[in-house]
Image (cartoon, grey):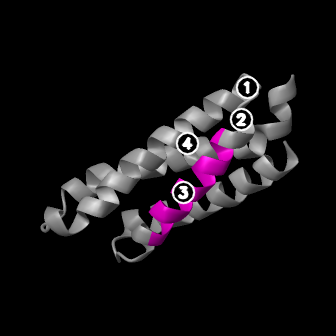
Amino acid sequence: MPHQNYQSCIDACNACAVACNHCAISCLMEPDVKMMARCIALDIDCAEICQFAAAAMSRASESSRLVCQACAEICRLCGEECAKHRMEHCQQCAQACMRCADECSKMAAMA
């Protein structure tokens, strides 16, 4: 199966999507939600592109490389934003985003 070549990237994308969804809902429960608006928006965008990237790689889509390039950029943006916040959910999300950005960059380079 061709998608097995991308399994570590698929796993990183799935883990990142879960972390971003968790971060977004957790940010909505913070006392100053307005301060978390950019974090929440990037979490949502990141979760969506990660899910799309994982699906594209799973079906060995010819656009996987392009999707993963975009995913890497959005993951970096989200990771940088989350890293600014001290909450544990944001810190965990930042780590997942940076791992995913690295995996997607590697995948895009080898595809």
Secondary structure predominantly adopted by residues drawn in magenta: helix
Label 1, label 2: how far apart the Cα atoms are? 5 Å
Q: Secondary structure at mark 4?
A: helix
Amino acid type at circle 3 is Cys
**Quadrant location of the N terminus?**
top right
Label 1, label 4: how far apart the Cα atoms are? 15 Å
Q: Mark 4 or mark 2: which is in front?
A: 2
Q: Are marks 1 and 4 in contact (CB under 8 Å)?
A: no
Label 2, label 3: how far apart the Cα atoms are? 16 Å
Q: Mark 1 or mark 4: which is in front?
A: 1
Amino acid type at circle 2 is Ser
* Label 2 neighbour load within 10 Å: few <14, some 14-19, many 20+: many
Q: Are marks 3 and 4 in contact (CB under 8 Å)?
A: yes
Residue drawn where x is 46% and y is 51% of the image: 19
Q: Are marks 4 and 2 in contact (CB under 8 Å)?
A: no
Q: Are marks 1 and 2 in contact (CB under 8 Å)?
A: yes
Label 3, label 4: how far apart the Cα atoms are? 8 Å
Mark seen at residue 75? 3
Q: Secondary structure at mark 1?
A: loop
Amino acid type at circle 1 is Ser
Mark seen at residue 61? 1
Between discs 1 and 4, the one toward the N terminus: 4
Label 4, label 2: how far apart the Cα atoms are? 11 Å
Amino acid type at circle 4 is Cys
Q: Using residue 12 as the reference point, say whether residue 27 is left or right of it.
A: left
Mark seen at residue 50? 4
* Label 3 neighbour load within 10 Å: few <14, some 14-19, many 20+: many
Residue drawn where x is 42% and y is 46% of the image: 45
Q: Which residues are magenta?
A: 67-80
Indicate whether residue 93 is drawn in magenta.
no
